[in-house]
C-alpha cells in the first residue's frame, strides 16, 4: 500500500476533490481526517470512505479563522499524533467572466482573500505537527488560471498564481525540516459538478450563456486539451496519492500539470 499508516488531514474534506482523495488515500492504507465547516456534509463524505472499507474521521474547522483553525488542528494532533500529509481543498464561489471595466475591488479581492487566507491558516496550523519522525507532505491545489490569460478571470488568475508562488516559497522554507510541498494543477474536472462540487454553480452561467448544460460546456472545454478530455476526480486523487507517498520523496517545489495538455509544460 502506498500510504500505509499515514495520517492525512484534508481541509475541505466534504467537497468533491477532498472526498475523492480521501477514498483513494484510505484504499492505500492511510487514515483520513476530513475537516470543514458543515458537519452533515463531512459525515456523508466520511461515510463514503467507510463504505469502501477505509478509515475516515471528521472534525469541524473554519479555515478563514486563523485562531479557530490552529485550535482545531492542535486538538486533532493531540488525538492522532504526528500529521504526515496535509491538503487544503477548500473552495469558494467567485467571479469568472467580469472584465476590469465592470469589476469592483471587493469582487476582485474575494478569491484572493478567501483561497489564500484559507491556505495560509491551514498550513500554519499543521506545520508544527509534521515531520517529527518521518517526512511530511503538504499538497496544494491550483488551476490553469494561474498560468493562462483568460479574459474575465482577473481575480481568480491572481489567486491561482499566488497559490503556486506560495507553494514554491513554502517548499524552500520547509525543505530543511523534511517537509515537501507540491502543487497539483488540474484543469476543470469533468465529473466534479456531478459529485456535488461548487463548480456546478460556478460554471452554470457560462454554460447558460452559450445555451448549454454544464456537462455540454465541459465537453467543449475538453477539446482545448491535447488529449481531448478533461481530468477526472479519480485522476486527481490517484496522482495526489502518489505525491503523498514515499515514492515521491524527492519531489518538492513542483507543479504537477493535470491539464491534459491544455497548459504545455
Image (tube, grey):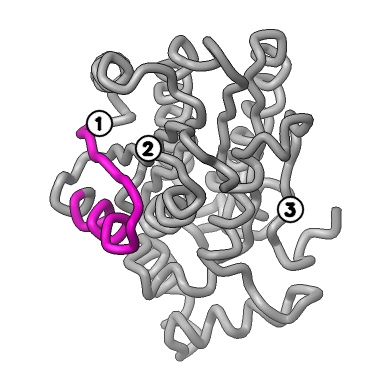
Residue 247 sits in which quadrant? top right
Name the residue beneath numbered marker 3.
257
Q: Which residue does the image show at 47% across and 80% down from the upper left?
A: 207
Q: Nearer the viewer, residue 124 or 126?
A: 126
Residue 194 sits in which quadrant? bottom left
Q: Which residue does the image show at 73% across and 81% down from the upper left?
A: 228
Tags 3 and 2 in contact by the CB under 8 Å rule?
no
Tag 3 or tag 1, which sits nearer the N-term? 1
Name the residue beneath numbered marker 1.
61
Q: Is residue 61 left or right of residue 100?
A: left
* Measured Cα–Cα span from mark 3 to mark 2: 22 Å
**Residue 28 horizontal/vertical position (percent):** 51, 50
Tags 2 and 1 in contact by the CB under 8 Å rule?
yes
Quick check: 174 above or below 193? above
Q: Is residue 127 left or right of residue 91?
A: right
Q: Which residue does the image show at 65% across and 39% down from the upper left?
A: 183
Q: Nearer the viewer, residue 207 or 98?
A: 207
Q: How many marks?
A: 3
Amino acid at each position: 500500500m502506498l500510504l500505509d499508516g499515514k495520517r492525512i488531514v484534508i481541509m475541505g474534506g466534504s467537497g468533491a476533490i477532498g472526498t475523492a482523495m480521501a477514498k483513494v488515500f484510505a484504499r492505500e492504507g492511510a487514515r483520513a481526517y476530513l475537516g470543514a465547516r458543515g458537519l452533515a456534509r463531512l459525515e456523508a463524505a466520511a461515510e463514503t470512505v467507510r463504505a469502501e472499507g477505509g478509515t475516515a474521521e471528521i472534525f469541524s474547522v473554519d479555515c478563514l479563522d486563523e485562531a479557530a483553525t490552529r485550535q482545531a488542528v492542535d486538538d486533532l494532533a493531540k488525538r492522532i499524533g504526528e500529521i504526515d500529509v496535509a491538503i487544503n481543498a477548500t473552495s469558494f464561489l467567485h467571479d469568472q467572466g467580469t472584465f476590469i471595466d465592470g469589476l469592483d475591488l471587493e469582487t476582485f479581492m474575494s478569491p484572493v482573500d478567501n483561497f489564500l487566507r484559507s491556505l495560509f491558516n491551514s498550513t500554519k496550523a499543521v506545520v508544527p505537527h509534521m515531520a517529527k519522525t518521518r517526512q511530511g507532505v503538504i499538497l496544494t491545489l491550483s488551476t490553469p488560471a494561474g498560468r493562462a490569460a483568460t479574459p474575465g478571470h482577473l481575480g481568480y488568475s491572481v489567486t491561482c498564481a499566488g497559490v503556486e508562488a506560495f507553494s514554491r516559497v513554502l517548499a524552500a522554507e520547509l525543505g530543511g525540516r523534511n517537509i515537501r510541498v507540491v502543487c497539483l494543477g488540474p484543469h476543470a474536472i469533468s465529473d466534479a459538478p456531478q459529485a456535488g462540487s461548487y463548480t456546478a454553480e460556478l460554471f452554470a452561467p457560462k454554460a447558460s450563456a452559450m445555451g448549454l448544460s454544464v456537462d455540454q460546456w465541459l465537453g467543449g472545454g475538453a477539446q482545448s486539451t491535447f488529449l481531448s478530455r478533461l481530468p477526472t476526480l479519480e485522476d486527481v486523487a490517484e496522482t495526489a496519492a502518489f505525491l503523498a507517498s514515499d515514492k515521491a520523496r524527492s519531489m518538492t517545489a513542483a507543479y504537477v500539470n493535470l491539464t491534459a495538455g491544455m497548459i504545455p509544460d
